[in-house]
């Protein structure tokens, strides 16, 4: 997953890197303000370290280039947008981002500009002297919050598909609230102290001398620089708005194309707009679970007419289509930009008779999946009457399914002498723990079942179990009205292959490291093995469970282990 978060065009990667640099700059600023609550000495130490970095030649160049690149590329993204129908979070990020440079100009001019132009010692007391109990003070507080929220939204939109980020979100939300609050409290605390100091004429004279406080001529020079910078910023924003309006005007004048939707309308669309953007701007229902980022393939369409005039798929689009076994005339609606009229069928939207419910389209979730299979079933039932075979299977399932249900799992499907179960709980940790509880319950139920078989003079039943946790898509798969709810994804395949591997390893179960970590179990001292599974590039570490009761010992060991200091 690490390489996936950097996937995208060069502009996207530069925008991400520049945004990270600016976010680090903002975090240092916030920590500097918050350090005031500890002591003036702590503040001075953080301030000295921060200024050493950001006011060095290298620091100035890096931050300046990052700021310029981020603003230009972000404005460019807005200018080339074909539709402004987007989720609220994206709207918020765009609008907050546009507000930042407008609010930031005065701060830069009266701090860094004052230092460079007039030799002002822009320590924090100087800043509070300028803005405390003024409208500018409220504006700078708003700037801090706006920049912080903008950066947090950007980080979340970038990393939200990674497993570690989803796990950390509750903690990150708390951190995201606490840090700016501490910074603002630090500002208010120090500003009040400075205000009290300056109420004494002697104290004011000493402070102004220490800061090299600007005189009237100096402030006039700063005001002129601020006005010029504000005009430049507004001009850049004006050019961006004009460019966007010009693109819209050219698109309106240019001969449009038509998108004909099977079992849907026929709509006019400007050239260069993706099929998904056309659907969104025209109000045509079109499923896109990942938000049109080309990773879920639920927006895919079958091109019934006009395929020969479409640009070829990119490497990323071709890889996604190949992963789902799509036919040659399938394309991702979020990626393909028709240059002439096309006729398309929305694979996950209409079925020709009725509109499928939202649940039938599928939803993504991070869940634990369990595969179980009875060993040696064919040899065991060879020569038996069909009734006896069915009777044995039903007795077996009557024993092992209740522990699955009791743990919060459900049997998704039965496959002859085996089954697949899913643990659909609110979060990954709960799902993983439920799966492990079910494995323990199956072990106890199997021991009881085999004891009864022994009393009847029958051979015991052996099983193999594979458990893996990861992203799955749950939905109704099949023809309308005859589509049972099921789940698909690599997680299902991995769990199935872990179960198959138990036979070769001579163990009752294999539990993936992802499941163990989600459940909060340590792997040190456990019988771990690295597996190369078909269809998976990287090896997967898994816990060898010789007997199902061994898993109980592992969980009890971790429960008794002392918490880390």
Image (cartoon, grey):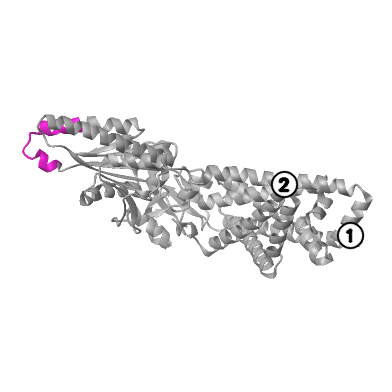
Alpha-carbon span between mark 1 and mark 2: 26 Å
Instruction: Decide which of 301, 160 is in the foreground and name it.
Output: 160
Q: Is residue 28 above or below residue 118?
A: above
Who's the residue at 34% across and 34% down the image? 409
Question: Where residue 384 appears, x then y in whole percent?
Answer: 7, 35
Q: Is residue 386 magenta?
A: yes
Q: Look at mark 1 in the image and give the residue it sits on.
A: 209
Residue 241: percent from the left, percent from the top?
67, 56
Magenta highlight range: 377-396
Write down the quadrant of residue 211 in the picture: bottom right
Q: Say which mark, if any, is on residue 379.
A: none
Residue underneath mark 2: 37
Query: In the image, 227: left or right of 17?
Result: right
Q: Nearer the viewer, residue 305 or 200?
A: 200
Query: Helix, strand or loop at disc 2?
Result: helix
Q: Going 63% across and 50% down the picture, which residue do you hit?
A: 150
Judge from the rendering whether residue 135 lies leftward or rightward of residue 532; answer left or right: right
Q: Residue furthest right?
A: 201
Numbered disc 1: secondary structure: helix
Residue 58 point in image, percent of width and height: 66, 69
Q: Please indicate, yes or no, whether residue 352 appears anywhere in the rendered image.
A: no
């Amino acid at each position: 997953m690490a390489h996936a978060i950097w996937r995208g065009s060069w502009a996207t990667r530069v925008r991400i890197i520049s945004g990270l640099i600016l976010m680090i700059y903002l975090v240092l600023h916030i920590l500097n303000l918050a350090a005031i609550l500890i002591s003036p000495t702590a503040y001075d130490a953080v301030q000295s370290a921060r200024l050493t970095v950001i006011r060095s030649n290298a620091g100035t160049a890096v931050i300046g280039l990052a700021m310029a690149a981020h603003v230009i590329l972000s404005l460019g993204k807005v200018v080339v947008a074909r539709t402004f129908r987007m989720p609220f979070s994206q709207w918020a990020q765009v609008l907050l981002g546009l507000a930042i440079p407008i609010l930031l100009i005065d701060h830069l001019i009266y701090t860094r500009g004052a230092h460079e132009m007039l030799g002002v010692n822009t320590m924090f007391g100087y800043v509070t002297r300028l803005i405390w109990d003024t409208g500018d003070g409220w504006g700078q507080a708003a700037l801090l919050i706006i920049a912080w929220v903008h950066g947090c939204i950007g980080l979340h939109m970038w990393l939200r598909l990674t497993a570690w980020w989803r796990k950390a979100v509750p903690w990150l939300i708390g951190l995201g609230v606490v840090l700016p609050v501490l910074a603002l409290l630090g500002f208010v605390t120090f500003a009040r102290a400075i205000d009290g100091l300056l109420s004494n004429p002697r104290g004011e004279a000493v402070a102004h001398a220490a800061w090299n406080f600007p005189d009237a001529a100096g402030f006039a020079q700063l005001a002129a620089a601020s006005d010029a910078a504000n005009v430049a910023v507004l001009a850049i924003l004006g050019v961006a708005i004009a460019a966007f309006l010009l693109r819209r005007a050219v698109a309106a004048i240019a001969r449009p194309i038509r998108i004909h939707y099977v079992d849907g309308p026929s709509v006019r669309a400007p050239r260069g707009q993706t099929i998904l953007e056309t659907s969104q701007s025209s109000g045509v229902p079109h499923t896109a679970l990942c938000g049109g980022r080309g990773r879920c393939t639920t927006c895919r369409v079958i091109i019934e007419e006009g395929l020969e005039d479409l640009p070829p798929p990119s490497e990323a689009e071709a890889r996604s289509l190949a992963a789902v076994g799509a036919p040659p005339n399938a394309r991702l609606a979020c990626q393909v930009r028709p240059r002439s009229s096309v006729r398309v069928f929305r694979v996950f939207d209409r079925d020709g008779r009725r509109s499928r419910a939202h649940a039938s389209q599928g939803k993504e979730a991070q869940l634990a999946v369990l595969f179980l299979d009875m060993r040696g079933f064919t040899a065991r039932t060879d020569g038996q009457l069909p009734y006896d075979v069915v009777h044995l299977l039903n007795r077996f399932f009557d024993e092992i399914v209740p522990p699955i249900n009791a743990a919060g799992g459900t049997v998704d499907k039965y496959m002859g002498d085996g089954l697949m179960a899913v643990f659909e709980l609110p979060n990954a940790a709960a799902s993983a723990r439920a799966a492990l509880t079910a494995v323990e319950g199956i072990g106890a139920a199997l021991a009881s079942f085999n004891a009864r078989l022994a009393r009847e003079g029958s051979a015991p039943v052996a099983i193999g179990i594979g458990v893996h946790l990861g992203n799955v898509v749950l939905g109704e798969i099949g023809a309308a009205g005859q589509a049972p709810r099921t789940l698909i994804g690599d997680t299902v395949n991995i769990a199935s292959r872990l179960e198959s591997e138990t036979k070769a390893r001579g163990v009752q179960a294999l539990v993936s490291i992802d499941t163990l970590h989600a459940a909060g179990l340590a792997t040190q001292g456990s019988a771990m093995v690295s597996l190369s599974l078909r269809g998976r590039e990287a090896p997967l570490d898994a816990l060898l469970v010789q007997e199902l009761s061994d898993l109980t010992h592992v969980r009890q060991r971790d429960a008794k282990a002392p918490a880390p200091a």
